[in-house]
């Protein structure tokens, strides 16, 4: 995810605000760009999920971690709850700035960022406890590929949240001027939905 997309340059936000002020309609280009980016990411993860199901269907034997390894369902459930909660806090921030409440935007964005970092820390800890590596069989490879790429996307989202928080602290958002907040929230909700799918497929229903 590019920094240019995540930051949603201030000039674009001012143009969107001016359009609203003059009674124009339509979605700001920054949001259109984010939606197109998310659409490409849907196809990317769709390919990864297809690879997972193809590998599972063609695997001879018991599907799952190699001997001596395990996956931690309770920890994964906790991480899922953390990420779902962060999606709510992100939306609270969006609703706050739509009302012009910059204080609550800073609060909720900070909480969302903290939850995202906590999720990443939990995922890294989980990797140290699995008992198997990337090359230890077909399941191991697809497991690390799917969860690793998702983790990279969460990290990208955390960078976006950091940018939003920094700009909010400098007073760069208002009720009429907050396109970057909306764009980052779209991406963060997408990351949340992808993880829910990963949790159900890899951890819960495998």
Image (cartoon, rainbow, N blue to C red):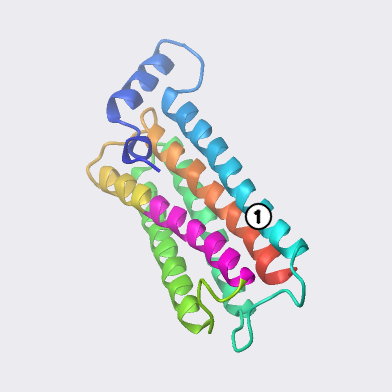
Specify whether residue 4 is in view: yes
Farthest left residue?
170
Residue 140 shown left or right of residue 24 in the figure? right
Residue placed under numbered mark 1 in the picture: 51
Residue 74 drawn above or below residue 86: below
Tell me where residue 182 sits by quadrant.
top left
The magenta stretch spans residue 144: yes
Tell me where residue 121 sits by quadrant.
bottom left
Residue 3 drawn above or below residue 123: above
x then y, percent, for residue 102: 34, 43
Residue 190 drawn above or below residue 7: below
Q: What secondary structure is the magenta-colored segment mainly?
A: helix
Residue placed at 64% from the left, 47% from the top?
46
The magenta stretch spans residue 127: no
Quadrant where the N terminus lies? top left
Residue placed at 73% from the left, 74% from the top?
63
Residue placed at 44% from the left, 64% from the top?
115
State the residue in front, 183 or 95: 183
State the residue in front, 45 or 110: 45
> 10 Å neighbourhood of mark 1: few (<14), some, or many (≥20)?
some
Residue 57 drawn above or below residue 91: below
Question: What is the magenta range?
Answer: 138-158
State the residue in front, 115 or 146: 146
Residue 152 shown left or right of residue 170 in the figure? right
x then y, percent, for residue 79: 54, 69
x then y, percent, for residue 110: 36, 57
Q: What element carries label 1?
A: helix
């Amino acid at each position: 995810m590019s920094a240019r997309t995540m930051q949603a340059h201030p000039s674009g936000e001012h143009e969107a605000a001016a359009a609203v002020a003059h009674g124009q309609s339509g979605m700001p280009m920054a949001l259109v760009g984010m939606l197109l980016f998310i659409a490409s990411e849907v196809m990317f993860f769709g390919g990864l999920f297809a690879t997972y199901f193809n590998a599972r269907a063609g695997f001879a034997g018991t599907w799952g971690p190699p001997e001596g390894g395990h996956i931690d369902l309770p920890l994964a459930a906790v991480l899922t709850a953390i990420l779902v909660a962060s999606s709510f806090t992100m939306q609270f921030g969006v609703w706050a700035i739509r009302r012009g409440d910059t204080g609550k935007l800073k609060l909720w964005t900070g909480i969302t960022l903290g939850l995202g970092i906590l999720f990443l820390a939990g995922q890294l800890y989980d990797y140290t406890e699995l008992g198997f590596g990337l090359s230890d069989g077909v399941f191991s490879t697809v497991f690390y590929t799917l969860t690793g790429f998702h983790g990279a996307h969460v990290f990208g989202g955390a960078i976006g949240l950091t940018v939003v928080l920094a700009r909010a602290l400098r007073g760069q958002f208002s009720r009429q001027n907050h396109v970057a907040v909306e764009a980052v929230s779209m991406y963060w909700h997408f990351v949340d939905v992808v993880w829910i799918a990963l949790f159900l497929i890899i951890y819960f229903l495998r």
